[in-house]
Image (cartoon, rainbow, N blue to C red):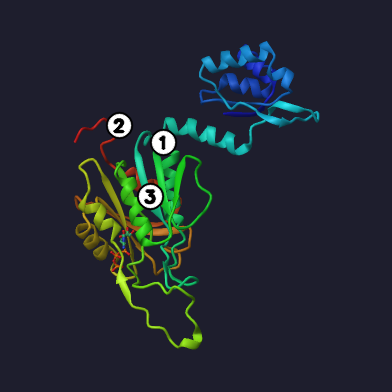
Amino acid sequence: MVVAPATAKVIGKYAHGISDDLVTATLLATRAPVLVAPAMHTEMWEHPAVVDNLALLAARGVHVVPPESGRLAGGDVGAGRLAAPERIVAAAAEVLARSGDLAGLRVVVTAGGTREPIDPVRYIGNRSSGKMGYAIADAAAARGADVVLVTTVHRPVHPRVRVEAVVTADEMAAATLAAADSAEVVVMAAAVADFRPKAVAPAKLKKSDGVPEIVLEPTPDILRLLGERKRADQYLVGFAAETDDVRENAAAKLAAKRVDLMVGNDVRSEDSGFEVDTNRAVLLDADGGVEEFGLVTKVRLADLILDRVRTPHPRQGATE
Ligand code: CTP
């Protein structure tokens, strides 16, 4: 339960068990974690009564987002202005994450399509929107994991996610392999280009110079590299974007890249794959387990994937 703004009166009543209105009655009745964001004039904020009441609440486990300094309702300036909404949301998310089932788990997620430059203004890219990767990063962070998101696209993200911006497959490989060194789970949801121009033209290619011939070379297969160096305590999730024979192709990639869980998805149907908010997925695990889902939102699929992320981590206390 979040009380924002929390006045000196609400804080005082809550601290002393007075419940004579809807807010304070709910505060006394709830078993949920409580977070208060005080807002009041500077003189009130500094008054010993308010200071003591807040100390009492904090000692009982109530979370406090202190006010900021700035212009107050009366036109004066000082400490007591309600914290910015982003700070309150971040504090609430932090409190909820602490009791999440993935608390303490370190997760790396990749998202978006890489861009491989042709010249200073053009690149080879793909249709990936990053929605699936962001959904996984958001869900993992909300469930308590410490998440690093290596991404080529930029969207609003859960405040607990650390974002690392990259552009090319090479940059994504470097950032992901480095982050994976201190992670128990890596989810490769990005659409990594398989080939890039061998040489990047230093200046814009001109139409007048005729049709260019662009020679390609392979990029690093990040998932394969992660599979090759996988530690016993690591769990690797890959995606297989397929237009045909989803299950068979996903199974082949699972084995070839030493992945623990492969999410096969049909990128040809209109309600699955690139750009849309939904997916049709089949989950294949290294033990031969197969689970097929009908149409689900990417947000829901993110939680279904994370439910299967079984790896030794602090909360499970496993020692493999
Ligand atoms: N992948 C990767 N590095 C690459 C290419 C792919 O890490 N250079 C990862 C993707 O992030 C995904 C998985 O490998 O998790 C499968 O990607 P996909 O494009 O479906 O398969 P490819 O191995 O590239 O095979 P193909 O394109 O021939 O289907």
- Any part of residue 293 in sight: no
Alpha carbon distance from label 2 to label 1: 12 Å
Quarter holding residue 254: bottom left
Name the residue located 23 percent from the left edge and 60 percent from the top edge.
251
Tag 1, which secondary structure? Answer: loop
Q: Which of the pair 20/306 is nearer the observer?
A: 306
Sequence-earlier tag: 2 or 3: 3
Name the residue carrying label 2. Answer: 314
Percent of width and height locating residue 62: 54, 21
Disc 3: CA contacts within 10 A as few (<14), some (14-19) or many (>=20)? many
Looking at the rendered structure, the kind of residue marked 1 is Gly
Q: Amino acid at mark 3?
A: Val
Of the numbered discs 3 and 1, the one sitting upstream in the chain is 3
Location of mark 3 (residue): 109
Question: Which disc number belongs to residue 261?
Answer: none
On screen, residue 317 versus residue 293, left or right, reads: left
* Residue named by callout 1: 144
Quick one: SS at disc 2? loop
Image x and y of residue 99, in percent: 42, 30
Which mark's residue is nearer the viewer, 3 or 1? 3
Give the secondary structure at mark 3: strand
Q: Nearer the viewer, residue 107 or 61?
A: 107
Q: In the image, what residue occupies the spot 27% across and 45% down? A: 235
**Residue 237, how many percent across, how many down?**
30, 51
Residues at discs 2 and 1 in contact (Cβ within 8 Å): no
In the rendered structure, the answer to whether residue 231 lies left or right of residue 103 reads: left
* Residue type, label 2: Pro
